[in-house]
Amino acid sequence: MNWNDRYATPDYVYGTEPNAFVAAVADRIPPGPVLCLAEGEGRNAVHLARLGHRVTAVDASCNGLLKASALAMARGVTITTQVGDLADYDIVAGTWSGIVATFMHLPQPLRRRVHSEIVRGLRPGGVFILEAYTPAQIAFGTGGPKDPALCVRLEDLRDELAGLEFLIGRECERDVIEGTGHTGRGAVVQVLARRPDPAGCAE
């Protein structure tokens, strides 16, 4: 899919409100900088900025990030945007209090690499928040990839995120109502995982 074309419309394809799972667990992110990967039009980044985090939003689409900046301005906050392909993007080790990725569907080899960088990129006590479609989503047809190989199972994530403590890890069905892009019943996996802090507290 050409995401620049996808986001060329003035409408927000996935809406302007944060992902419901992100909103539900955002209070588990310790104070500090937050990285939003495959952030698209900025709905999660803007929400987290409104909670007081310094947020960097990364996406391959400049059109998406222009809309993210516009949404931030409309909501009275500032976010940093970076146009970048996750195949080339470097997640700096030990930097982030939180990393967020919703519906970031990548080919398995790239997904494994990005997930290992996420583990290293978190500060001690930092958390990773993920929601994605499982292969069961193909039968629903309410959004997401058409190729089940781009979907992900909880068992895959437990392997690829080795080194993190899973505070929430579940596969479930829920109504995903996010703009016109995700509309209807969906099969998702949700993860809230924390990098252990040997000192016993988050930075």
Image: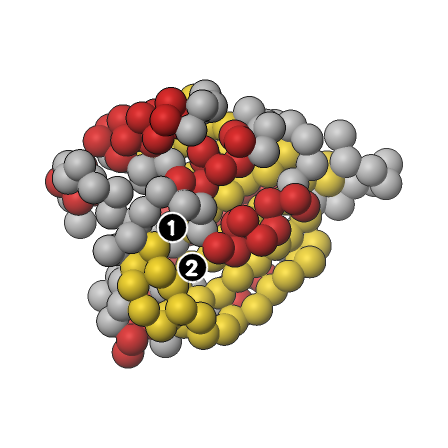
Question: Residue 138's spot in the image, x, y percent?
Answer: 28, 73
Q: Residues within 10 Å of mark 2 (few under 14, many from 20)?
A: many
Contact between marks 1 and 2 (CB within 8 A): the answer is yes
Q: Is label 2 in a helix, a strand or a loop? A: strand
Q: CA distance from mark 1 to mark 2?
A: 7 Å
Q: Of label 1 and label 2, which has the lower sequence position?
A: 1
Which residue type does callout 2 highlight? Ala
**Seen in the image, is 59 located left or right of residue 47?**
left
Position in image of residue 145 (x %, y %):
27, 61
Residue lying at the far right of the rendered structure: 199
Report the residue at 48% width, 55% height from top.
20
Seen from the viewer's position, the closer of residues 173 and 162 is: 173
Q: Quadrant of residue 9?
A: top left
Quadrant containing the C terminus is: top right
Residue 177 found in image quarter = bottom left
Return the mark for residue 132: 2
Q: Residue at x 32, y 69 (%)?
A: 184
Question: Helix or strand or loop: what does disc 1 sit on?
Answer: loop
Residue 201 seen? yes
Amino acid marked by disc 1:
Met
Q: Which mark is residue 104?
A: 1
Which residue is more in the foreground, 91 or 6?
A: 6
Residue depicted at 75% across the width and 45% down the height: 196
Q: Quadrant of residue 183?
A: bottom left
